[in-house]
Amino acid sequence: MPRSMTAYARVTEEYSWGSISCELRSVNHRFLEVGFRMPEPLREAETTLRDMARKKLGRGKIDCSLQIAFNRADASSDLDLDLARGHIKIAEAIAQELAQAAPISAIDIMKLPGVLKDSAVEPKQLNKAGIKVFDSALNQMMEGRAREGEKLAEMIEQRLLGIETQVMLVRQHLPDILQQQRTRLQEKLSDIKEQLDEQRVEQEMVIIANRADVDEELDRLAAHIIEIRRALSHSESVGRRLDFLMQELNREANTLGSKSISNITTQASVELKVLIEQMREQIQNIE
């Protein structure tokens, strides 16, 4: 089954020193684009996380947010006073430049990267926890994309059945359509029949029949339907292939309409275009 590019996942892992959370949001995109928002202690793991995403995902825009919550009561903290003083001097210089008071909050200084460090938790331990929670969230998101992809496949299958109905309708009426066209032409020529060469009339009828023959278009429509179903049976990225097949279906529907000599084939061409457009909208979300 295909996978959708739209999904959401959130996982939180608890540890003695606190907790770490990972939130993933995925939407459709032409290529794979992964963006990370994470605290500085986890930056070393970003390359590993990107590689993990590339191995499991083919397309989609992925927004990843990683957050760490420490248990301050249980973890000792080191304060980098030199770094804090540097930030204070910068804030004071900005305030003096602006010629106005700029209150400096000690809490705000503590929130700046590197000022307050949790010495009880090793960086390797944090990175390992970050990788683990990301992997869990990634698997959860993959499951969501699979469930959504299954629903999209069902919607597409319904439209395929509609296309098959229109193809069958045209095939059933095609002999009658050609016969009606032949009868109509013969009636128009009945008044001047004596002045026309019977063989020439037959030749013209053959030309008209060839121009109105849509068997080839109907065969290609049926072949594309088979190929779409084959693509939907695979689990890898098939969105681009399905989008190409939509273009081919639309081409055949347009040709069917241009060759139309009957309201039946004209209406069938319109219905086909509607069904194809509905499928195309769904396929935009398939990986």
Image (cartoon, rainbow, N blue to C red):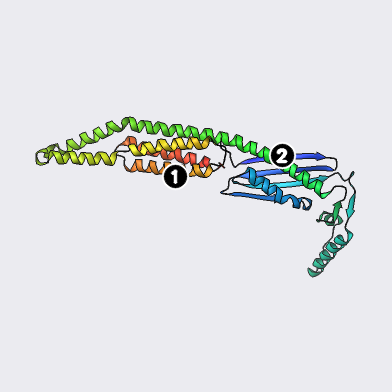
The residue that mark 1 highlights is: 247
Q: How many angstroms separate mark 2 from mark 1 (CA)? A: 38 Å
Q: Nearer the viewer, mark 2 or mark 1?
A: 2
Q: Quadrant of the C terminus?
A: top right
Give the quarter of the image for residue 212. Answer: top left
Q: Position of residue 267 (x, y in %)?
A: 36, 37
Q: Which SS class for mark 1? A: helix
Q: Amino acid at mark 1?
A: Gln
* Residue 271 can be seen, yes or no: no
Q: Which SS class for mark 2? A: helix
* Residue 219 can be seen, yes or no: yes
Q: Quadrant of the N terminus?
A: top right
Q: Nearer the viewer, residue 140 or 271?
A: 140
The residue that mark 2 highlights is: 136
**Residue 13 shows which numbered tag?**
none
| Left/right of residue 65 with respect to residue 187 in the rendered view | right
